[in-house]
Image (cartoon, grey):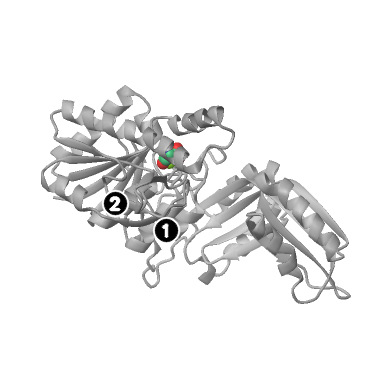
Amino acid sequence: MATIVQKYGGTSVADAEKIKNVAGRIASACHGGDRVVAVVSAMGDTTDRLIELAGEVSSTPESRELDALLSTGEQMSCTLVAMALKSLGLDAVSLSGAQAGIRTDSRYGKARIAAVEAGRIQGELEGGRVVVVAGFQGITEDMDVTTLGRGASDLSAVAIAAAIGADRCEVYTDVEGIYTADPRHVPNARKLKEVGYEEMLEMASLGAKMQPRSIELAMQYHVPIMVASSFVDAPGTLIHKGADMEPRVGEIRNRARAVATDRNVAKITVTGMVDRPGISASLLEPLTDADISVDIVVQNASVRDTTDLAFTVSGDDADRAFEVVRTVAYLIGANDVIRTDNLAKVSVVGAAMQNTPGYASRMFRALADEGINIEMITTSEIRITCVVDADRVSQAARALHMTFGLEKPD
Ligand code: ASP
Ligand code: MG
C-alpha cells in the first residue's frame, strides 16, 4: 500500500463538476489500494478575486488580514472536495493548513514553512480517511494564518509528502506535463518522461508551471513529483533525481533536454566607467536595495582604464532599474546609460552539458545560421543562455530544438 500526496491546481477544481471529477480521481487511487492526502488550490481565479476585493475596501490592506482572507479560497475548495468524496462513499476529512500542522514564520504573503507537524494527518490516514488539505497556507506560533506565496500549493504538497514520508507526490494540472520547449513556439515540442530537479528549475516556462520553491524542497527531501493532467488520462512527467544519472560507458546520450525561453527581458548598459575596484558593487548595490534582481551581468575588458558593464533585469523592473542606475552612473562619472527593451532569453537546458564539449558552439552556430544576433551569453553547469531580440525568440527556439534533436523520444 503506497501513501501518495495528490495536488490539484485551481483549474482542476474550478467548478462543482470539476470538483466531482477530482473526487472521482482520488477515489480511484483509494480503490487501487493507495492512502491519499489531497492538497488543493483555490477554485479557478478565486485568489485573484479576493485580492481585488481587498483592494476595493482598502488601498493598503493589512498583510495579516489579507492572508487570513486569501486562505479562505483554499478552505472553500478543500471542504467541497471532502464533501464530494463522502458522497462517493469514501470517508474523508478536510483540514486547513493550521489543522494540518503547517507551521510557518510570520512573513505574511511569503511565509516560509518552519515545520510540518504531521500527527493529525497521520492519525486520519491511519483511521482510513482520505485527508484533503488546504494548500498555500500555514500558521504562525501565535496562531495567525499565513500564506506561502503565489502558486505555493505545490509547496504545501511537497512539504506534506516529505513530512509523512509519502512514496510520491502527484501534481495534477491543466497540461499533461513538462515539454522539451514551449509548445506555443515550437509545434513539435515533446512531453518529457522524466526530468531532473535542477533541470526543472530552469524549465519553469515549459508546460506545467511548478512553483520553484517546491522543486527545491523536493530536491532537498528526495520527493519524486509526477506532473500530469487532471483532465486526460495520459502519462505525465516524473521530476526526480534519476534523470541526472551518468550514462553507461560508451553510451552517447543527448545531454540537451529542453529549450527554455523568457520573453520579458531588458538590458541596461553603463559605458565609460573608470575601471577600479568596487565600481560594479557601487552600481549594483542600489538595485539590491530597491529589491530588483539582476540576472546576467557582463563586464567588458577595460580599454584605456575605462570599461562598460551590461546587465539584464526582468522587463517589469526595467523602468525602476534604469532610474536607479542613471543616478548612480552620474555619481560615479560614467559616460552614458543605455537601455534596450524587447529582449528575450533562450536557453538550452541539460544536466552536465558543461562537461561535454560542443554544446555551446552548436548553439551559437544554429543561431548564426538563422541570422539571429546574440546580445549576451551566460552559461551554468546545466544551461547555456543567449539574449536575443524578443521578436526572433520563437524562431531561435525552433532552430535549437531541431539542432539538438529534441523532437526524438528519450
Ligand atoms: N491559490 C493560490 C494562488 O493562486 C495558491 C495556488 O494556487 O497554488 O496563488
Ligand atoms: Mg500552480
Q: Vertically, is 256 above or below 30?
A: below
Q: Nearer the viewer, residue 25 or 354?
A: 25
Q: Nearer the viewer, residue 226 or 305?
A: 305
What residue is disc 1 on?
A: 216
- Whichever of labels 2 and 1 marks the residue nearer the N terminus, that label is 2
Label 1 is placed on what type of residue? Glu
Residue at the extreme front? 142
In the figure, is residue 309 to the left or right of 186?
right
Question: At 77% from the left edge and 70% from the top edge, which residue is drawn?
Answer: 279
Question: At 30% from the left edge and 28% from the top edge, which residue is drawn?
Answer: 19
Packing grade of label 2 (10 A; few <14, some 14-19, many >=20) is many
x and y percentages locating residue 304 in the rendered image: 89, 75
In the figure, is residue 210 to the left or right of 84?
right
How far apart are labels 2 and 1 at the CA level? 14 Å
In the figure, is residue 293 to the left or right of 93?
right
Label 2 is placed on what type of residue? Ile
Q: Nearer the viewer, residue 105 or 284?
A: 105
Tell me, yes or no, whether the two marked residues, 2 and 1, touch with CB atoms within 8 Å.
no
x and y percentages locating residue 202 in the rendered image: 51, 55
Packing grade of label 1 (10 A; few <14, some 14-19, many >=20) is some
| Residue 232 visible in rendering | no
What residue is disc 2 on?
A: 160
Question: At 62% from the left edge and 42% from the top edge, which residue is drawn?
Answer: 394
x and y percentages locating residue 370 in the rendered image: 69, 49
| Residue 254 image label | none
Circle 1: element type? helix
Query: Could you say which quadrant of the image residue 215 lies in?
Result: bottom left
x and y percentages locating residue 44 in the rendered image: 42, 30
* Label 2 near ligand 1 (CB < 8 Å): no
